Amino acid sequence: MDIDLPYYLFWATVISGAIWAIDSWFFKPKRLADAEGKTADKAAADTEAKAAVSEPVVVEYARSFFPIFLAVFLLRSFVAEPYQIPSESMVPTLDVGDFILVDKYAYGLKMPVFDLKLTEGVPPARGDVMVFIPPHDPRYFIKRVIGIPGDTVRYENKTLTINGERLKYTFVREFTDSQFGMPAREYIETIDDVNHLMHRTRRPERAQTWNIGPGEYLVMGDNRDHSADSRAWGLASHDNVVGKAIAIWAHKEPGWHWPSFDPSDYHRQRLGRSNLLHRSDCFNGNDDGQPVRLVAP
């Protein structure tokens, strides 16, 4: 079962804040006035008043947790939010168990729960790794932006052509795909100024063409043959964009393992523009299949 954390966090913040505010404005002054009116002795009145104005347990917990709820809500809603990668669709960019940080400000701020647009931000660009809600599923997905509004994108023979220009693919290495049991290749795919690693096999796939309209984005996983993306369910809507993945800050292997916060353990560099992932087993080369060692920038 998926838990809508922003929804529950929002209401936890509202309810705890309301309890604290109502008690501070209405009930606490009344308790204090009642206590002071019970005796004419000022010293005794002060002591009795302090005892009388002791907060109920519910109010005490609300007052204690409200600042925490509010800080977490504001941070997750308007600055950055952590996510964990659940599938192999973005391998080799993102492994299962990677913890990523998503910038909520990059593409414009939205009010959680009510989904109100607060700021416009910068539109997603080709090559961005984007978190969004797809048209067929209420859960968050993460894919790479391939096409933006106004683009015509052709996908044929495992290669992409954007507005008539074929993307550059630089051979890295060959390996065996564990699921299909067939040869697969790792390439460096270049989209504008973004270089990133991607996997593809020789598994047959139908050709497709997209004419991308306003507020639409063509998205694909970097693990092309193991990704459910725009090729299956269509284009992503700008209204359902959540944010931009900007960093991998931890990794956890499946099962009972502690998360690792050492970048060398999960061989990552960063998710920014114009960079490659830093992997000890990574090679750079060309389309003739002759690899050379990749030098990390």
Image (cartoon, rainbow, N blue to C red):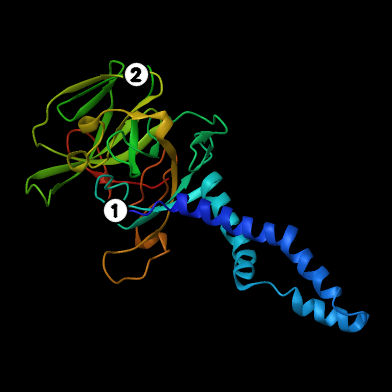
Q: Which mark is residue 154?
A: none
Drawn side of residue 144 relative to residue 30, left or right: left
Crowding at dot 1, Cα within 10 Å, few <14 / some 14-19 / many 20+, comes out as some
Observer-nearest residue: 95 or 216? 216
Drawn side of residue 161 relative to residue 238, left or right: left
Quadrant where the image shows the N terminus:
bottom left
CA separation, marks 2 and 1? 30 Å
- Label 1 SS: loop
Drawn side of residue 151 relative to residue 8, left or right: left
Specify the quadrant of the image occupied by residue 286.
top left
| x 91%, y 83%: residue | 43
- Label 2 SS: loop
Residue 111 point in image, percent of width and height: 53, 40
Observer-nearest residue: 5 or 263? 5
Residue 296 point in image, percent of width and height: 39, 47
| Looking at the image, residue 249 lies above or below residue 273 | below
Quadrant where the image shows the C terminus:
top left
Q: Which mark is residue 86?
A: 1
Label 2 vs label 1, nearer the camera = 1
Residue 75 point in image, percent of width and height: 56, 51
Drawn side of residue 294 relative to residue 61, left or right: left
Outermost residue to the front: 38
| Looking at the image, residue 83 lies above or below residue 239 | below
| x 86%, y 73%: residue | 37
Q: Amino acid at mark 1?
A: Pro
| x 33%, y 45%: residue | 139
Crowding at dot 2, Cα within 10 Å, few <14 / some 14-19 / many 20+, comes out as some
Q: Amino acid at mark 2?
A: Asp
- Sequence order check, earlier mark of 2 and 1: 1
Residue hosting label 2: 151
Observer-nearest residue: 256 or 204? 256
| Looking at the image, residue 34 lies above or below residue 170 | below
